[in-house]
Amino acid sequence: MEKRELTCIGCPMGCMLTVILENGEVTEVTGNTCQKGDIYARKEVVNPTRIVTSTVKVTGGEKERVSVKTASDIPKDKIFEVMKAIDAASISAPVNIGDTVIKDVAGTGVDVIATKNIS
Amino acid sequence: MKNYDIVIVGGGPAGLAAAVSAKKAGCDSILILERDTELGGILNQCIHNGFGLHTFKEELTGPEYAYRFIKQVLDLGIEYKLGTMVMDIAPDKTVTAMNREDGMFTIPAKAVILAMGCRERPRGALNIPGYRPAGIFSAGTAQRLVNTEGYMPGKEVVILGSGDIGLIMARRMTLEGAKVKCVAELMPYSGGLKRNIVQCLDDYGIPLKLSHTVVDIEGKEHVTAVTIAEVGPDRKPIPGTEERYICDTLLLSCGLIPENELSRSAGVEMNPVTSGPIVNESLETNIPGVFACGNVLHVHDLVDYVSEEAGRAGENAAKYVKAAGDSSEQGAAEAGAAQGVDTASAGKPGASQVITLVATDGARYTVPSTINVDRMSDLLTVRFRVGDVYKNSFVSVYFDDERVMHNQKRIMSPGEMEQIILRKSQLSERPQLKTITVKIENE
């Protein structure tokens, strides 16, 4: 049996959640005051994911950097690998919102895309 | 210089949404004046996601959210000037501005929309003891350096204040390789969103020290260390609780202040609680035809609410211009019969019902401050903030002495805006109603 403690992000209450896991499966969530906490805890403990946002160097554009994001959420433990790939990347202008900057970043199967137009 | 019916001061989220709504409400003569080199305001440097959940039902980054509105401004052919600083707004709504192409110029506007946003509270306003070396930045300045200029302000960081920008920058600096040693917050609660505390601090093991403040900054040329200490209920440091952190950077995220120098010199009356203009149901200030919206009016928590509010300001400004035009045509025909009538309320002569809104017992302020029932829309959103953390308390609304709303909220905190919705029918059926009071009650 494993016990994990989390803070719910569903609302400003910030309930302190306690999750009980057995063999990697959630058996009990306590401390939540509504259904949101239960759903959040089950996802967060088994498969925590995040969107990563950063910037990438632009060459030949009116600006030095273009803001980027992962097109969808990636596993939380891949964040720093993704950042490493983003820091090494560069793109030449013009760039449009939605353009792919890095394909399949750090083997996540997720692309990094531009979030700003640079001419 | 060409004349415009509506001049909008500021091309950030508020100015953009106001322009789009004014145009859609039928005003074709609109000019946005923006001092930066691009439209979008602060959203351009807010590269993180989480914007637009209410408006677009999806999570956008700041630049993406801004572009949704910039595109509408471009598609609607609304005019704007970049790199343009507004120097003065006269009480008669003459706007004086300058830029490199046009030099100094004036525009006699029929309506002005104030959308200048806000600024961060600087170190000078915080009374932090210690030296004044390089390496102390407001969180927003650091955000601009990292996200738009591509520079890192430092490698080892302490952050004072747990506002959302500070939390976002704790994560951002960490992702770019810096070590964020702690976030100190003077208050016993954070001013930031819970989600940001979890995803920006907890995710990276950055400690949040509530009821702590900076008591010393070391370093003559550059910051070398910062000392923080716990504070008591009187918010004064408790001797013996000091902790010294070796660092090269101190970020400050200690509140935002609406930027109202132009409003004040125009003679706009201000609310000392919000540091923003006092407005009526139409988001109009005490100067007829001068409207305010967004963070210059009161600091918002979510940009979605800025856009919604600014949309109303734009629509009302367009109505005002139209009504002023109608009354001046009528005035010419009826030899001055309409003289002195220059507001959108011109339509209904005689005494209209004006109600004052009062915030008390935990509610710090309301926007708007007054309601002219004739001019209000069928539903009016009144926004306010609370002064403390309240659990399982009630938002109560009194019409004079009668309690008409009593809604329990599981939690309210100073970091989040609250709202109530008033119906026009509720108010118009009470012609004697003078005061609406918003308060927080335990039961």
Image (cartoon, coloured by chain):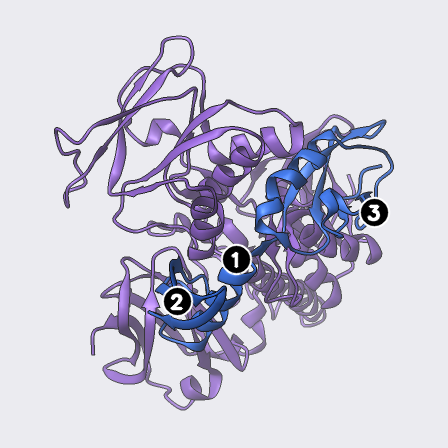
Chain colours: A blue, B purple
Disc 1 chain ID: B
Spatial distance from mark 3 to mark 2, Cα to Cα? 42 Å
Q: Nearer the viewer, mark 1 or mark 2?
A: 2
Kindly identify which residue carries mark 3: A99
Q: Is residue B362 left or right of residue B199?
A: left
The residue that appears at 76% across and 32% down in the rendered structure is A89
The residue at 72%/43% (across/down) is A106
- Circle 2 is placed at which residue position? A20
Left or right: residue B120 compared with residue B226: right
Which residue is depicted at the point 55% across and 57% down? A48
What x and y, as percent, mark residue B325?
70, 65
Within 10 angstroms of label 2, few (less than 14), some, or many (20 or more) residues? some
- Residue holding disc 1: B302
* B41 vs B26: above or below: above
Q: Which element is circle 2 on?
A: strand
Q: Secondary structure at mark 1?
A: loop
Q: Chain of mark 3?
A: A
Q: Amino acid at mark 1?
A: Leu
Q: Which mark is residue B11?
A: none
Relative to B242, is B371 above or below? below
